[in-house]
DNA sequence: CCGATATTTCGCCATATAGCGAATTATATC
DNA sequence: GATATAATTCGCTATATGGCGAAATATCGG
């Protein structure tokens, strides 16, 4: 029960749900999720740590970067069920589709450039 | 998205999850749920209204009593998915099994007696 | 070793939420 | 109509949560 409630609480925030949906079929660096959600790095880090504690995501560290991915086949059944339910319910949601589009743009940028640009009110044109 | 978050928020409270699980395969009167959760009537009423707003439960009014049941086949897919996920994840949870046992006892009581007994620190033996 | 940089942790604030009891509403019974 | 009763709404309090910026941590490049 404790574990299960950890999952439901984790799913109870819109930004965390958006982050999970963004991780469908790919892994993302924290800075890419920051860019997507347009929130402070500390806020996004906290969100991701909540998702990790609920076992909804796994992480991989590569140098200074931390990559997140959805929990896979090794995960607990309730976690896999949650992810399946989430994806099925929101796949066609207009906000999620919009995020998907936004992500396509974000993914075009080199990670180091993206990270360096954060916190400096990036101008879209340069 | 708005509707979906309504569901996830509703699932984010342990007492609401317990109430939903209690409704598997039967309908219950509010006073029976009050007895199960051992919370104030106003608190339980609020919980159930949140579940109703999320469309996770339907209600039927019969005189002074209000009966709750899980949303059925007519419900939105994300709601049905949520209920299915919930039941599959918690069916064997020890807290839920304990609630199931407790409910068996509660169901033995006549509704009017149960309601009348609430708020008066019922002695198990009378 | 010394910055620079990505992430996390900490401290704080504003808001949301769960809980209760009292007051209100709706319905049944007298 | 008056009274009793099941449920809801209201007002309040205590706690939890999401947000940020500053400070701390970890890692890379010189």
Image: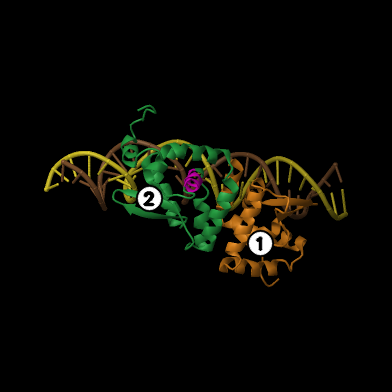
Chain colours: A orange, B green, C brown, D yellow
Q: Measuring from the top left, give residue B5's x and y in whole percent.
A: 52, 57
Packing grade of label 2 (10 A; few <14, some 14-19, many >=20) is some
Q: Looking at the image, is A121 positioned above or below residue A80?
A: below
> Which chain does the numbered disc 2 sit on?
B
Q: Furthest-bottom residue in view? A: A125
Determine the image quadrant of residue B39: top left
Labels 2 and 1 touching (C-beta < 8 A):
no
Which disc, if any, is residue A22?
1
Q: Measuring from the top left, give residue B115's x and y in whole percent.
A: 33, 39
Q: Looking at the image, is B75 positioned above or below residue A46?
A: below
Q: Measuring from the top left, give residue B11's x and y in whole percent.
A: 52, 50
Residue plotted at (57% across, 45% down)? B91
Quadrant location of the C terminus of chain A in the rendered image:
bottom right
User: Callout 1: helix, strand or loop?
Assistant: helix
In this image, A24 relative to B50: left or right?
Answer: right
Which disc, if any, is residue A62?
none
Label 2 in the same subunit as label 1: no
Q: Measuring from the top left, give residue B30's x and y in whole percent.
A: 38, 45
The residue carrying mark 2 is B67
**How would you classify the magenta stretch by its main secondary structure?**
helix
Quadrant location of the N terminus of chain A in the rendered image:
top right
Residue plotted at (70% across, 53% down)? A71
In this image, C1 relative to B41: left or right?
Answer: right
Determine the image quadrant of residue A123: bottom right
User: Callout 2: helix, strand or loop?
Assistant: strand
The foreground one among A73 and B53 is A73
Residue plotted at (45% across, 52% down)? B51
Q: Which segment is the magenta one?
A: B15-22
Q: Looking at the image, is A98 positioned above or below residue B103?
A: below
């Amino acid at each position: 029960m404790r574990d299960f409630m950890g999952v439901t609480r984790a799913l109870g925030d819109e930004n965390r749900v958006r982050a999970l949906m963004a991780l469908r079929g790919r892994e993302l660096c924290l800075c890419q999720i920051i860019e997507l959600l347009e929130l402070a790095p500390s806020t996004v880090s906290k969100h991701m740590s909540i998702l990790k504690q609920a076992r909804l995501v796994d992480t991989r560290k590569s140098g200074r970067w931390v990559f997140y991915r959805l929990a896979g086949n090794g995960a607990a059944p309730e976690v896999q069920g949650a992810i399946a339910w989430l994806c099925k319910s929101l796949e066609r949601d207009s906000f999620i589709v919009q995020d998907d589009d936004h992500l396509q743009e974000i993914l075009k940028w080199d990670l180091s450039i993206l990270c360096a640009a954060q916190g400096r009110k990036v101008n879209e044109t340069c």
